[in-house]
Amino acid sequence: MTISTFYPIGTPGVAWGPAEVAMWLSRQTRQRSYETDVLRAVDGLRTRFDIVEYGQLDYAPDRYPLVAIKSRQWRDTLPCVLVTGGVHGYETSGVHGALQFVEKYASAYEGKIDLIVVPCVSPWAYERIHRWNPQAIDPNRSFRENSPAPESAALMRLVEPFRHRVLLHIDLHETTDTDESEFRPALAARDGIVFDPGTIPDGFYAVGDTANPQPAFQQAVIAAVAKVTHIAPADEKGEIIGSPVVAPGVINYPLRKLGLCAGMTEARYTTTTEVYPDSPRATPEQCNAAQVAAVCAAIDFALAPG
């Protein structure tokens, strides 16, 4: 089956060049507002938290301030918790789940942790409901030295001063039907390879680190989320998105090797959440609540004695 069957840009078997990227970019349109949905919500938190502008994306004619929400009582003696959302801008509950966690629950951890929440790592992609940035680069494969993605590079610069102190990093994502209908076909076309169709898991799952899996931690996250929404079952091969299921709702990836956001620190506890918003069994409110439940459970486990 050829790439052209699935994606209208490029020549099957040939990776994109500047012309194809420009054609792809010309088809992207703004569908929602980062300023309205994210920046205004962050502004509403200024009375309780410090708001840090850690960079700016200049994608002419648009400019996007990059913001983080930080504990007001920051103390270097406390364990540090990093929460990230919107690395893939189209994954809506990652952004709004992060904001909802701060609004409703973050204050409960005051004095126990240094908390830093970056609710929308990729605002250009958030507005266009896309996975990539304007250069057709996936920020969540770009957390590495000399990153080609400005979104990833800016976040790494923000975290670098306290990277060695991060106890927990939870990165909030979604797996959507458009992964199969748009994003994976586009990726195959961009890279000049054949698109091999897969299946979308129906439900929530978590991605641990192959090098540091922390199975009890992952299961604590799954158990908390199961009270809010359903957990994705393994497929007939015992896999989720092509990876072996190591426990109910859990797979592992080599986070650092792949340049994934959750591998950017030396945290003892890391996980990437994956909510399924297109399920007939889940609402947008449930998806946001699942992300919040995952964050709270992850922090509670990381802080538990023993």
Image (cartoon, helix red, strand yellow):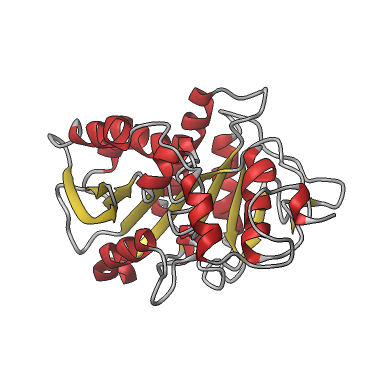
Q: Quadrant of the N terminus?
A: bottom right
Left or right side of 197 for 256: left
Given residues 141 and 188, the one toward you in this image is: 188
Q: Single out the residue that lies furthest toward the left.
A: 47
Q: Nearer the viewer, residue 172 or 120?
A: 120
Quadrant of the rendered image containing residue 35? top left
Rendered position, 149 above or below 205: below
Q: Is residue 305 visible?
A: no
Farthest residue in the front direction?
A: 19
At 26% across and 31% down in the image, what residue appears? 41
Residue situated in front as seen by the camera: 97 or 155:
155
Q: Position of residue 55 (x, y in %)?
A: 23, 57
Q: Tell me which residue sits at (67%, 23%) in the image.
A: 280
Q: Residue at x 71, y 46 (%)?
A: 248
Residue at horizontal 30 percent and vertical 36 percent from the top:
38
Considering only vertical position in the picture, is 231 above or below 21? Answer: above
Asked whether 43 or 271 is in front, the reply is 43
Residue 282 percent location from the top left of the image? 61, 25
Indicate the quadrant containing the C terminus: top left, top right, bottom left or bottom right.
bottom left
**Residue 96 in sight:** yes
Q: How many marks?
A: 0
Q: Position of residue 210 (x, y in %)?
A: 62, 67
In the rendering, at what x and y percent does residue 133 appear? Answer: 44, 54
